[in-house]
Image (cartoon, rainbow, N blue to C red):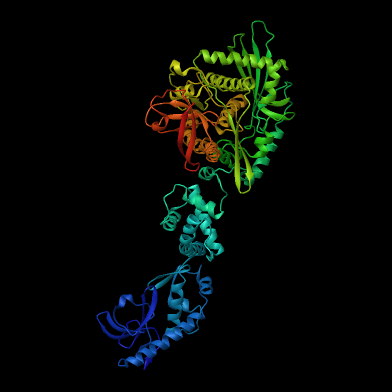
C-alpha cells in the first residue's frame, strides 16, 4: 500500500528529500526515533537525518519492510519521474504569475498555478525547480519568498557579473602572465568577448584608481605571481593594446577628459547659456583693445589698451578687458558642476584640455578679434611714477582689434611700431620696477617647448627653447599681476569676498630680486612657501603685493570664474554670487580638486622630457650643480628645466653651486620617474 500525497510526519517506508552540497537528495526512511531518522540514500549510503533537515515535500509513504533493492528501485523511479517533471516546468512563467500577488507562498499554492492535481512527485519537482531559481525565489522553510521585479533584475545582473568574474578568474591569470613575460596574448588562448570586456574594464579601473572592493580582490588574485609594480595594470594594458603606448594615466586618475567629448551631454545647457548671452548683448566699447598670447592660443581671456593720460600730473590710463563667462552663468547647474570638476584648463604636449566646453571657452566667451564679447573692463589710472591712482571696474561689451602672438608683439615693440604698445611697455616696466623695489622675487629661466610627432607606433619627442620675448612677456605678466592685485584691493574696499592666492611669508633679502642662473633660482625658491588658496586677502610675498585674487583667466580656471562672478555680481546688482561663509565652504573641495588636476600639468611634461632623455641617455648633457649638500647633490638641466640627483662619488669632493658638468645617464624610466646618472665630467 502506498500514500502518494505529501506526508507531514515521515515514518519508516517514507521517501524524503534533504539538501546536501546545495543539491536536493532522495532517501528512504528506515527507522524513526524522536525526530531522528535513519535513512538509505539513492547513492546506497546509510545516514542519520534530523527531521529539521528535510525539505517540505516528504512522501510518498510506503509500507515498511521493503528489501534494499526494492528501496533503491523505488528511489530511482521517483528520481527519474521528478527529473522529467522538473524539466518540463517554466519557472519564469510561474514567477510571472506569482509576483505581485503575494510576497511569499507555500509550495502547494504555487503548485496550483501549474498543476490541476499535484501529487508528491509534482510538488517535489516544483520545489526542486524553485530552489534553482535563486534570482526569482528564496526558500524560507516552509515557504518560498517571491522576489519583486526590481530585485530580480538586480539579482540577474549580479549573477551575470559573477559568471563573468568566474570566467575572468580562469583566463585572466594566464593572460596577464603572458602579457607580462611575452608582451602578447598566448597562442591558443580563446577569450570570449564578455570576458575580454571584463578584463579590459578591470585594467582600466585599476589604472584610474576607480575599482571597487570586488574588483580589487579580483585584481589581487589575477596579479598573483607577477612583480610588484606601481603601474602594473598600465603596463599590461599597453602590452594588450587596451591603451596606447605613453598613455596618460594621470588623466585617468584625475577623471579628466582631454578632448571636448565630456561636454556632449551638456549640449542643451550650453545652447541655453548662449541664448542668454545673445539676449544680453550691447554695443561694444569704441576702444581698440589688443591681446597678446601664444600663436596657438584660442581661449583668449584678456586684452588691453594703454594711453598716456592727457590730464596734467597723470601718467597712464590702462583699460584691461577680461573675458566674462559669468554672464548668464548658473552656479549649481549641471554645466557648472561639470566645469567645477574640471577645475582648470590643461596645456600638455599631447594636446590641450579646456575647462569650458569649446563652444564657450574657444568661441562665445573668448576675446576673438573682430567679435563682440561680454567683458569685465577695469580702468586703471597711474601717476607718472607708476603708482596706481584709481581702479574702476565695470561691465561692458568689447570688440578686440587684434589678437597678437608674443613674437609679433616683440618685434613691434623692438621697432617702436605701435605707440600704444610702446606706452604699454613703458608702463609695464614701471610696474615691474616698483614690485622689485617692494621685494619681489622674479624667476627668469628658459622655457623649453615639448613637441610630439608620431613615428610609426612610437612617439618622437623634440624639445627646443622658445625664442625669448622679454618685452611682450613682461607687458602681459605685469598687467595680469596688476589686475589680480588691483581688483583684490578694490574688492576689499567694497566688501566683496574673493578667493585669494596668498604667500604670507617674509622673504629674506637673498630671495628678493631677479634670478636667472640655475643655482640662484634653486636657492631663492627654497625660501618660498607654496601659495595657498584662501578666502581672506593676505600678502603674496614673491609678487610683492598685499593682496592677490586670481580673476584674469575665468575661461581657464574655476577660481577665476568664481572671482569674476563675485565682482560682476556686485557691479550688476550689488549681490556677489557667494557670501563670505559660502566662499569659505567651497575651499576644501576646490583645493582638493585643483590639486588633483594640477598634478597632470605638473608631472606630464616631465614624463615626456624623460622619454626624450631616455633616447639620448648616452649623449652628454649640460648640467649645473644647484645644491651640494648630502650624499645626492642636485643638478639642474637648464635646457630641459628639470632637476636630477647624482651620487656624490660621481661628482668629486670639491663641489660648489654653479659648477658645470657634462652628464650621461644610465637607467631612465619615465613612468616611475626613475633617472640615474652614469657619468659626470666637470666642464
- When asked about the image quadrant of residue 488, the answer is top right
Residue drawn where x is 47% and y is 71% of the image: 133
**Which residue appears at 67% of the width and 11% of the height?**
309
> Which percent across, then down, holds residue 640?
54, 32
- Count of marks overlaid on the render: 0
Residue found 52% across the figure and 33% down from its top:
620
Q: Residue at x 39, y 24 (%)?
A: 654
Query: Where, by quadrant of the figure, is residue 558 drawn?
Result: top right
Reply above or below: 88 against 651.
below
Does 233 sit left or right of 570 as displayed? left
Q: Nearer the viewer, residue 664 or 601?
A: 664
Would residue 462 be seen by someone viewing this image from the given angle? Answer: yes
Residue 673 sits above or below residue 307 on the image = below
Q: Is residue 376 left or right of residue 134?
A: right
Q: Quadrant of the N terminus?
A: bottom left
In the rendered view, does 418 fall on the left or right side of 4?
right
Work out whether residue 119 can be spotted.
Answer: no
Residue 263, horizontal then vertical, whole percent: 62, 44
Q: Position of residue 562 (x, y in %)?
A: 56, 31
The picture places residue 508, in percent across and down from the top left corner, at 43, 17
Task: Identify whether 438 is placed above or below 259.
Answer: above
Write down the quadrant of residue 294 in the picture. top right
Q: Residue furthest left?
A: 34
Amino acid at each position: 500500500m502506498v500514500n502518494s500525497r505529501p506526508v507531514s510526519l515521515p515514518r519508516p517506508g517514507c521517501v524524503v528529500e534533504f539538501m546536501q552540497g546545495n543539491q536536493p537528495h532522495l532517501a528512504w526512511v528506515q527507522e524513526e526515533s524522536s525526530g531522528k531518522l535513519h535513512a538509505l540514500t539513492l547513492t546506497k549510503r546509510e545516514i542519520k537525518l534530523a527531521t529539521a533537515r528535510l525539505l517540505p515535500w516528504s512522501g510518498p509513504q510506503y509500507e515498511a519492510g521493503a528489501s534494499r533493492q526494492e528501496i533503491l528501485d523505488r528511489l530511482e523511479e521517483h528520481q527519474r519521474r521528478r527529473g522529467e517533471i522538473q524539466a518540463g516546468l517554466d519557472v519564469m512563467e510561474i514567477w510571472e504569475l506569482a509576483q505581485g500577488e503575494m510576497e511569499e507562498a507555500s509550495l502547494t499554492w504555487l503548485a496550483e498555478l501549474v498543476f490541476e492535481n499535484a501529487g508528491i512527485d509534482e510538488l517535489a519537482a516544483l520545489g526542486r525547480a524553485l530552489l534553482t531559481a535563486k534570482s526569482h525565489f528564496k526558500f524560507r522553510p516552509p515557504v518560498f519568498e517571491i522576489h519583486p521585479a526590481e530585485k530580480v533584475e538586480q539579482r540577474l545582473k549580479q549573477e551575470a557579473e559573477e559568471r563573468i568574474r568566474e570566467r575572468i578568474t580562469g583566463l585572466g591569470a594566464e593572460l596577464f602572465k603572458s602579457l607580462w613575460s611575452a608582451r602578447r596574448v598566448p597562442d591558443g588562448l580563446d577569450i570570449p568577448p564578455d570576458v575580454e570586456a571584463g578584463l579590459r574594464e578591470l585594467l582600466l579601473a585599476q589604472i584610474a584608481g576607480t575599482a571597487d572592493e570586488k574588483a580589487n580582490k579580483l585584481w589581487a588574485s589575477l596579479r598573483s605571481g607577477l612583480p610588484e609594480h606601481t603601474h602594473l595594470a598600465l603596463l599590461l594594458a599597453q602590452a594588450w593594446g587596451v591603451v596606447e603606448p605613453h598613455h596618460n594615466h594621470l588623466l585617468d586618475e584625475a577623471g579628466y577628459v582631454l578632448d571636448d567629448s565630456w561636454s556632449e551631454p551638456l549640449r542643451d545647457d550650453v545652447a541655453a547659456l548662449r541664448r542668454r548671452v545673445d539676449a544680453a548683448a550691447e554695443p561694444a566699447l569704441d576702444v581698440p583693445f589688443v591681446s597678446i598670447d601664444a600663436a596657438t592660443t584660442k581661449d583668449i581671456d584678456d586684452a588691453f589698451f594703454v594711453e598716456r593720460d592727457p590730464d596734467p600730473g597723470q601718467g597712464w590710463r590702462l583699460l584691461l578687458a577680461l573675458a566674462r563667462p559669468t554672464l548668464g552663468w548658473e552656479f549649481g547647474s549641471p554645466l557648472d558642476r561639470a566645469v567645477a570638476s574640471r577645475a582648470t584648463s590643461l596645456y600638455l604636449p599631447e594636446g590641450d584640455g579646456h575647462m569650458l566646453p569649446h563652444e564657450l571657452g574657444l568661441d562665445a566667451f573668448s576675446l576673438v578679434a573682430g567679435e563682440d564679447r561680454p567683458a569685465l573692463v577695469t580702468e586703471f589710472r597711474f601717476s607718472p611714477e607708476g603708482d596706481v591712482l584709481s581702479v574702476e571696474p565695470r561691465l561692458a561689451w568689447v570688440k578686440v582689434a587684434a589678437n597678437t602672438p608674443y613674437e609679433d608683439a616683440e618685434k613691434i615693440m623692438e621697432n617702436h611700431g605701435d605707440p600704444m604698445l610702446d606706452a604699454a611697455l613703458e608702463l609695464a616696466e614701471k610696474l615691474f620696477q616698483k614690485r622689485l623695489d617692494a621685494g619681489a622675487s622674479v624667476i627668469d629661466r628658459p622655457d623649453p617647448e615639448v613637441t610630439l610627432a608620431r613615428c610609426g607606433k612610437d612617439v618622437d619627442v623634440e624639445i627646443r627653447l622658445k625664442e625669448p620675448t622679454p618685452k611682450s612677456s613682461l607687458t602681459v605678466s605685469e598687467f595680469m599681476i596688476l589686475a589680480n592685485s588691483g581688483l583684490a584691493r578694490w574688492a576689499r574696499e567694497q566688501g566683496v569676498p574673493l578667493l585669494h592666492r596668498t604667500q604670507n611669508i617674509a622673504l629674506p633679502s637673498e630671495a628678493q630680486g631677479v634670478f636667472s642662473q640655475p643655482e640662484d633660482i634653486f636657492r631663492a625658491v627654497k625660501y618660498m612657501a607654496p601659495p595657498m588658496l584662501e578666502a581672506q586677502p593676505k600678502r603674496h610675498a614673491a609678487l610683492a603685493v598685499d593682496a592677490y585674487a586670481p580673476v584674469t583667466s575665468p575661461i581657464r580656471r574655476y577660481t577665476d570664474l568664481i572671482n569674476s562672478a563675485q565682482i560682476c555680481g556686485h557691479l550688476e546688482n550689488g549681490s556677489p554670487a557667494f557670501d563670505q561663509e559660502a566662499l569659505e565652504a567651497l575651499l576644501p573641495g576646490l583645493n582638493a580638486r585643483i590639486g588633483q588636476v594640477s598634478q597632470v600639468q605638473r608631472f606630464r611634461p616631465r614624463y615626456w622630457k624623460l622619454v626624450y632623455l631616455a633616447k639620448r641617455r648616452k649623449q652628454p648633457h649640460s648640467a649645473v650643480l644647484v645644491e651640494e649638500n648630502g650624499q645626492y647633490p642636485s643638478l639642474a638641466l637648464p635646457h630641459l628645466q628639470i632637476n636630477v640627483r647624482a651620487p656624490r662619488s660621481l661628482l668629486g669632493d670639491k663641489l660648489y653651486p654653479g659648477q658645470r658638468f657634462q652628464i650621461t645617464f644610465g637607467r631612465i624610466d619615465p613612468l616611475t620617474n626613475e633617472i640615474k646618472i652614469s657619468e659626470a665630467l666637470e666642464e
